[in-house]
Amino acid sequence: MKKILTLTPNVVDLFLSLDIYSSDNTTGLCGGLELISPTSLILTTRCVRRSLTRSLRRYDEAGIDCARMMRVSTLASTTKEVPTRHPRLPFLLVSKEFSELGFPIFYSHVRLAWGNDAWFRAIQARCTSVESVTADGVMTYVFADVARLHGATLIDCDVPILSHGSRLDGASFAQLTALKRLRWDSAIGVSSRRNTPSAAPALEELMVRAADKSFLALFARSELPRLRVLHLLSDPNTRRTERTAECAQLVEAHAPKLRTLYISTGIAGALGTRFLQLCTQVAMLTIALARQDTPPSAASLSPPNPCTTLSTLVFTVPSRKSGKTKDITTAWTAFFEQWDYETLVPNLAEIKFMFFSWPTTERDIAKHPWVGLAEKLLEDGVHLLDRDGKGWRPRLRVTSGRRR
């Protein structure tokens, strides 16, 4: 210890424990204390100070740092006397200045309940920074007012329009100059003419669950130079009907710009071998199946030239129609035997199925129909993922040695 203190003469803070066992040698410690002069000293015990008394006299820069006791007359944590806030007072009614400054921010994200849009129409003129509008269902004139008054700032729109006999003017979509994400779920017709301007020039993501032919035709004619994500959803269990021909035209019009695409087997089949040839930039493709035992046609995923950008392929089933396990396995085994994915999509890394999970016990693994297919794909460098996004890991196989 004396050597350590000799090499560190500039020690400022010294923490010293006097809980020393009787078997320990303190000669080095006591000899080294005379070589330093700290400004603060912390001791953990008050016993046996005689060995330090002589050294403490040489600490000419040390000081005493202890809190002096004083009588407490007040509590520092007492609450100041302030008026009690009204529990139901709206934020914007605190003051006129607060109302003017906070009004645009407070109504930047608007949520309209079912049939309760009168209050919003009354204050729309003061809402100058609306960025998102979501609703359960509104009339045609409400959407037209939103596009006219907030088209320059609106970024996200999810407003289902109720069909009540009237049609929506297609020019309203051209007023949405800042819109990036549009979720459409309405069967209302859209009136447009040849001179109708292009819709939503800044649109990046379009999700369509239900739409009239006129809506799909309008967006197929529009330029949409920034469109990167397209979701054409359909659900056979609901009243929504898929318009295959119009959806195929929409995909064909904007396929070269897309990075992410969600379509059904019907749309992919309508495009045929041109499908992946048109999607020159798509990296993630999701195909919605009618049934689990009905894979897409191999021709729809067999372009004339290899698709080098596709890396992730997802198969999902929006409906609850599953089919027998044996039929599912037979159908998908035949599909992968017909589809030459190594040549047609050479950079494919993941295939995800959203309708099963991997087994965890050895008994279930032996009976699981997807294990064999997963190991075959893994040999080709393609990972098969379940609904949780977990890839299959082959188990170690222990073989019995040859008897001598």
Image (tube, grey):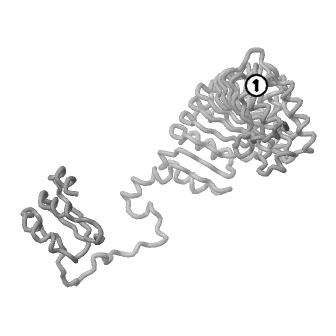
Q: Position of residue 248 (x, y in %)?
A: 77, 27
Q: Secondary structure at mark 1?
A: helix
Farthest residue in the front direction? 404
Which residue does the image show at 80% across and 22% down from the upper left? Answer: 340
Which residue does the image show at 22% across and 53% down from the upper left? Answer: 4
Q: Position of residue 309 (x, y in %)?
A: 66, 23
Amino acid residing under circle 1: Gln
Please say if 330 is above or below 319: above
Quarter residue 282 falls in: top right
Quarter residue 382 falls in: top right
Farthest residue in the top direction? 305
- The one nearer the camera, 263 or 225, is 263
Please say if 117 is above or below 166: below
For residue 230, say whether it is visible.
yes
Q: Tally the marks.
A: 1
Q: Position of residue 104 (x, y in %)?
A: 46, 50
- The one nearer the camera, 149 or 394, is 394
Q: Is residue 272 left or right of residue 174?
A: right
Number of residues whose C-alpha sits closer than 10 Å to that of mark 1, classed few (under 14), some (14–19) or many (20 or more): some
- Which residue in the protein does label 1 denote? 249
